[in-house]
Amino acid sequence: MKISNINWGDDSAEKDPNLLHYFISQDAVDRLARKQKSLVVGRKGAGKSAVRKKLSDTFANARQSHILNLSPKFQSIKTILNDKDLTSGMGEEILFTHTWLRQIYLDCICAVGHGERNKFSVESFEFARNIANQQNRTSKDIVENIADVLSRIKGKVTNLGEFGINIERELRDVADVEALEHHFLEIAKAASFVVLVDDLDLGWNNSETANNLILGLLTAANYISSKTNNAFVCIFLREDVYSILITKTQHSDKYRNIERLRWEKDSLIQLLGERINFNRKEAGEPESPNPFLTVFPTTIGTSNTDNWLVERTLSRPRELIQLARYYSEKCESDTPDVEALKAAELGYSEWKLDDLCTEYSNQFPGLVDIFSYWKTKFYRYKYHLKADELEAMVLDMLVETELNQPWFNAIADNVDVQGLLKILYEIGFIGDFVLGGDGGSKTVYSYQGNHQPRFEEVDIHPCFRKAVGTVDRIRSRAQETGG
């Protein structure tokens, strides 16, 4: 098998037709399949959409089970967050709770309405059929449902506060929750529903409206689970979004029992191995007991290749697959090529830095300007920096970087060195170097778990070093010129 011909799969789990052939099952997936957790949290690229696809396939085999995948489009969320009524006072959590209830009930009822009669009560089945016909077999999307509810509200009041203590009763009325819930629960006596909600981070901008939109969904999901055991609403959230939301609600205790997606080295390497063997079978070759070493060299420099690869990721599958893709496309033979792997690192590192800026573009717009300045001003600096070196660099950035964004202006105006360092740590660009101790010196990165960084010394993460032009150590001018 020619290494350059390997198909590592689509970047998007939804678009990868072969995903289930090489899906790596973990304990987390088993717990979700048993419905022990209903909130899945993971960073971008951690495999949330892949897990959702696997769960959808798993639950589809259950008798009398209806699977619904809700994935709001970017434009839909953008429309909601730019709506003047919602941003000027209407966009409260309780409003979104009832629009999500309406959305989920309608979707479930429509799924039954164009199905077979089965065991449902005649009244509720006929209701479902009528709803399905009215909605053209599928219900409206979340934007249309919110618009419907808003138009009805504005026919009664100019703001939600005018409802007073009757707000919940009024919202249940305008959103048709009472009637929809009655028929949904009747149908749920003879059928089960699995509702998988993903892509909520698309367009999310950490505004009050954006946060209320998702908090409303969490509340709606909890409410539905309290009404019936035959409806499982599972929500997939990006980890940074979850961390912010949990500070915005008085009911954070309800959302602590989460399934956090984490990847260890062995699982990541197994992920590559499964995809390699899949390609071998597609090429008419037998599976290998150690597929990794049929494609990758055993070592690169002084490091084992498996360690070297994983160290250049933030422990997420998508990054590892992307690095493997950069490598395989540079290979010109069917044998592992260490030089091709070395050559792949720069392109991958530049991709990863761009990916990082994109991942946090809503929270920290303009990050790309900071790294552009870093690459030009601090080119060929060490990747290991002590506190005094780091402080001087950050002060330089705060003064010289031409970035006009509220988050950065607040840091620059207050000369908040620690504030910028915390952001660079949170997004994974730098790690906190901890000296000594029983386990020896180590560098801790934010994605590895809870840690309070001290920033006495830091390391730039290996996956970004090539992109920003760091070196292992500063050589003297005489060494560089051979003098």
Image (tube, grey):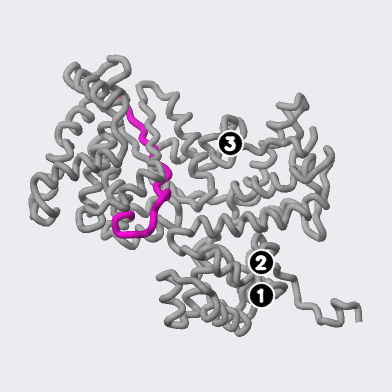
Circle 2/circle 3 CB separation < 8 Å = no
Circle 2 packing at 10 Å, graded few (<14), some (14-19), many (20+), is: many
- Residue 140 appears at what percent x and percent y? 29, 33
Q: Which residue is mark 3?
A: 23
In the rendered image, residue 205 lying in the magenta stretch gets the answer yes
Residue 1 image point, x, y percent: 79, 32
Q: Is residue 456 visible?
A: no
Q: Amino acid at mark 2?
A: Val
Q: Residue at x 67, y 42 (%)?
A: 272
Please give the residue where the numbered disc 1 appears in the rendered image.
Answer: 378
Q: Nearer the viewer, residue 374 or 271?
A: 374
The answer to whether residue 341 is above or below residue 208 is above
In the depicted structure, whether residue 295 falls above or below residue 413: above
Q: Secondary structure at mark 3?
A: loop
Residue 445 position in % (x across, y down):
57, 64
Amino acid type indicated by mark 3: Phe
User: Circle 1: is it few (<14), some (14-19), or many (20+) Cα within 10 Å?
Assistant: some
| Location of mark 2 (residue) | 468
- Answer with left or right where residue 237 lies relative to residue 123: right
Mark nearer the N terminus (1 vs 2): 1
For the residue pair 359 and 105, the one nearer the viewer reads as 359
Tell me if I can see residue 96 in this picture.
yes
Callouts 3 and 1 close, C-beta under 8 Å: no
Residue at figure coordinates x 27%, y 57% from the top left: 251
Which amino acid type is shown beneath numbered disc 1?
Phe
Q: Tell me the distance, in whole angstroms, between the alpha carbons under discs 3 and 1.
A: 41 Å
Q: Are marks 1 and 2 in contact (CB under 8 Å)?
A: yes
404 magenta-colored: no
Displayed quadrant of residue 120: top left
Magenta segment = 191-210
